[in-house]
Amino acid sequence: MSTEPTIQPTAAEDYVSAELYTRIQQFYADQMALMDHGQAEEWAATFTEEAVFPAEVTGRAGRAASARAHAEKLIREKADLRHWLGMLDVRPQPDGTLLTRAYVLTARTVRGEELRITASVVCRDHLVEEDGRWVVSERSLRRDGSA
Amino acid sequence: MSTEPTIQPTAAEDYVSAELYTRIQQFYADQMALMDHGQAEEWAATFTEEAVFPAEVTGRAGRAASARAHAEKLIREKADLRHWLGMLDVRPQPDGTLLTRAYVLTARTVRGEELRITASVVCRDHLVEEDGRWVVSERSLRRDGSA
Amino acid sequence: MSTEPTIQPTAAEDYVSAELYTRIQQFYADQMALMDHGQAEEWAATFTEEAVFPAEVTGRAGRAASARAHAEKLIREKADLRHWLGMLDVRPQPDGTLLTRAYVLTARTVRGEELRITASVVCRDHLVEEDGRWVVSERSLRRDGSA
């Protein structure tokens, strides 16, 4: 176990509504599936224009290019990659934005080989509303096993 | 990454209600647990009579027989098998039925051996309502790593 | 597959409301994250004072001490451990308490080594309300692969 941000336990008044919680669950199911199916532009549109993700990539065009390169690499490797996100925590902020925390696992299957669970990650996002949709404005990942 | 159906990104108006989303989550928790606990008849009843699943099996009696054979095989192998379903997407259709897409992982533990994650699958279902319950009328599975 | 309690299939009237279902999902996301982040006292407070968990440990102080020892062991081993809970079933009881059943997977990553999924467990809890919060009064775990 490493030095990580302290978890603020969920007080009774911290529980978010079913409508909000399931909307964010649906947002992530969509975002992960778009990535895993190589839909680079659609995936890039689940972030704000200004977001910096992955590292040092900003702007939707740059983000889409990065996702496209990643998808093409998977095709060359004959690999399917699935991002699972779970154990979701959602905290509304006074300004109407959301801070989320979730666990992510990646399942990678190369044709003809055994499936491998390649990474366990804690994902912390800042979500903002744009045109009635939630999008990620900031993402911070902490991979298990890193220093 | 292989050729797979394109994901239709979730537009703001595509999000389903919390009531529907959690109902389908509960449906799958039930369906997977029934399978994993060897309750063949109850599992078979989570499909329509006409559904063809698994491959070439139709009718609830045939489906139950197939599930029973599978459960008995696990007992002989001293194996526990758990189906995890997540990253759920639910799309209501104009006729009131639902199309769903989800990721499935299978965790298999043989007594005295290490647990193995044996498969990652994308599951696409057509759900219809029968007597106030959702049941699967069509299921299509695409296993990661297949051609 | 081993001898386990029979699953009561979810009848149409058994589905719980979205508000209750997502509240319990949030409860578990919180409880697992507190454990995995080594917050022993906060984790211990997600059980009743009288609960016996882990085996033979009772009282929040004893439970916190047990969790603290576990967290310190992980630090010494340079291991991150993540508890995933899913496939959740929630059954309200006539006295207003809840019986839940869920699958749990543990993902363990030691610095410099590959991630391992170390256990698959079926978790059955009895939840009671205390001061407007759900807490665990009884927990029974059945680890896959055990006799």
Image (cartoon, coloured by chain):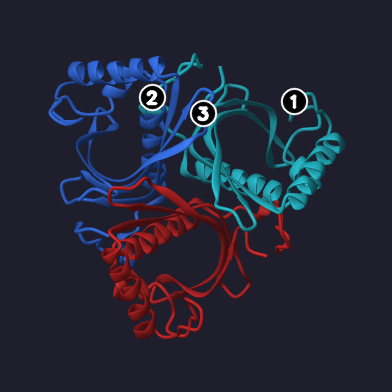
Chain colours: A cyan, B red, C blue
**Residue under the point 27% across and 66% down:** B76
Distance of mark 3 from mark 2, alpha carbons? 24 Å
Q: Name the residue under label 2.
A: C34
Q: Which of marks 3 and 2 is nearer the N terminus?
A: 2
Q: Which chain letter matches label 1?
A: A
Q: What element carries label 1?
A: loop
Answer above or below: position of B45 versus A55. Answer: below
Q: Which quadrant of the structure image shows residue A84? A: top right
Q: Distance between the residues labelled 2 and 1?
A: 28 Å
**On the picture, is B128 further left or further right than B71?**
right
Answer left or right for B23 relative to C55: right
What residue is disc 3 on?
Answer: C113
Q: Can residue C115 be seen in this view?
A: yes
Q: Are marks 3 and 2 on the same chain?
A: yes
Alpha-carbon span between mark 3 and mark 1: 24 Å
* Callout in the foreground (3, 1): 3
